[in-house]
Image (spheres, helix red, strand yellow):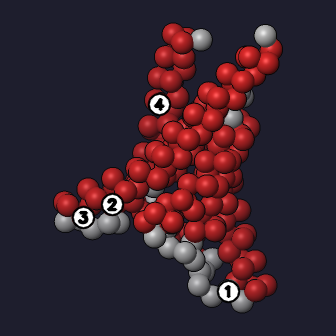
Amino acid sequence: MEKVLLRKKIAAQSIIILLSIVASVLLPEIFHLVGAVSGVGTSLGSAFLPMHLAVLFVGLIAGAVAGGIVGAVSPAISFAISGMPAFSQMPYMCIELAIYGIVCGMLRNSKMPIVCKVILAQAAGRILKAVLIMIAVYCFDFQAVAVLDVWYATVQGLPGILLQLVLIPLLVFRFNGLKKYYE
C-alpha cells in the first residue's frame, strides 16, 4: 500500500514539475508576443518576469526539489527553443531561478506570510546571482556580463516583482483551497 502511495506521489510531483516547466517556457513567449503585437516590443518579458511566476509558485506548492528543478531547467529549455534568455545570462538565470524555487520550497510550510516567502526567495536569488557574476568577472575575467546587470535587471523588472508579490499569494491561496477537493 505504501509503495502505491509513493508512486502516486512521485507521479503527481512529476506532473507538477512538467507543467511548471511548460508554464515557465510559455509565459515569457506569450509576454513577448503581446509586446510585439501591441507595438511595445519584446521587453514585456524583461519587465514582468513571467518565468519567475511559475518557479516561485511551484516551490510554494510542491517543495524545494520541484522548485529547484523547474528553476534550473526552464531557462535552459527556453534558450534552446527561443534563444531567450541571452546565452551570457542563461547560466546565471538558471541558478537564480533555482534558488527562488528552493527557497520558496524550504519556506513552504513556515508560518510566515506568502509575500515574505516570495521576498526572501527573490532576495536570495538576486544576491547569489550578483555573487556569481562578481566571481565570473573578477576571477575569470568574464566580461559578457557586469555586476550592475543584476541592479539594472531588478529595476527593469520592478513591475514583475510587484506582480509576483500580488499574484503568487493569490494563486497559492486558490490552489490550497482547491486542494481539499481532490485529496
Of pointers 3 and 1, the one earlier in the residue sequence: 3
Q: Amino acid at mark 4?
A: Leu
Give residue 171's mark: 4
Q: Residues within 10 Å of mark 3 (few under 14, many from 20)?
A: some
Q: Residues within 10 Å of mark 2 (few under 14, many from 20)?
A: many
Badge 1 is on which residue?
A: 142
- Label 1, secondary structure: give it: loop
Badge 3 is on which residue?
A: 36
Distance in Å between CA atoms under marks 4 and 1: 39 Å
137 or 22: which is nearer to us? 22
- Indicate whether 135 appears above or below 55: below
Tell me whether circle 2 and circle 3 mark residues in contact (CB < 8 Å): yes
> How far from the left and from the top, in percent, is residue 19?
51, 39
Q: Amino acid at mark 2?
A: His
Q: Amino acid at mark 3?
A: Ala
> How far from the left and from the top, in percent, is residue 144?
59, 84
